[in-house]
Image (cartoon, rainbow, N blue to C red):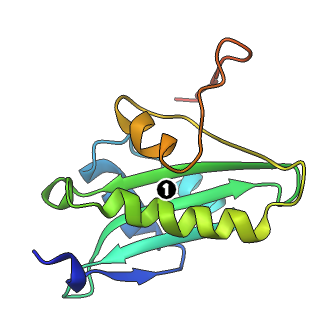
Amino acid sequence: MNDTAITVLLATPDAATYRHLRVASGLSDKSAEAVAQGLPNTLFAVQLLDAGGQPVAMGRVIGDGGCFYQVCDIAVLPAHQGRGLGKRIMTEIRRWLDAHVPQGGYVSLIADGDAQHLYAKFGFKPTAPASIGMALSRR
């Protein structure tokens, strides 16, 4: 695949696309109810489409639009990994953050495994030991 065939779409994916990209990329599935409630609250989203117009990657920013923002749902289909698509997603997200997050806004993310190296290229730094990421997950 030639990466020039990838199109950037700055739009929130529909529920089916969102769930497919998460699961196929190795992220956990989210219930239809959670997706229906959550996606409309997206502050910014980017999708990458292949030459046929099919979504192969995505990323989102969520938050309150003033004080707190979280980068989430960075997902690239396995057949398209290792081709710089994560960097393309993060470039769009960083561009949006730079234009929209006010002075004093706090942008966070949870980096799984080696993804921390990608996020570091975009200015993200570990918060430990000053703070530790924690989560409460409803299953």
Answer with left or right where residue 138 lies relative to residue 120: right
Q: Name the residue located 13 percent from the left edge and 59 percent from the top edge.
A: 79
Q: Residue tagged by mark 1?
A: 32
Answer with left or right where residue 40 lies relative to residue 64: left
The amino acid pointed to by label 1 is Ala
Q: Name the residue located 66 percent from the left edge and 17 percent from the top edge.
A: 132
- The quarter of the picture where the N terminus appears is bottom left
Answer with left or right where residue 100 lies relative to residue 83: right
Residue 72 position, x and y percent, is: 54, 49
Inspect this view and state whether residue 43 appears.
Answer: no
- Farthest residue in the bottom direction? 52
User: In the depicted view, which residue is nearer to us: 80 or 123?
Assistant: 123
The correct choice, above or below, for 109 with respect to 126 in the image is below
The correct choice, above or below, for 108 with respect to 65 in the image is above
The correct choice, above or below, for 78 with respect to 1 in the image is above
- Which of the 4 image quarters holds residue 3? bottom left
Q: Secondary structure at mark 1?
A: helix
The correct choice, above or below, for 120 with respect to 74 in the image is above
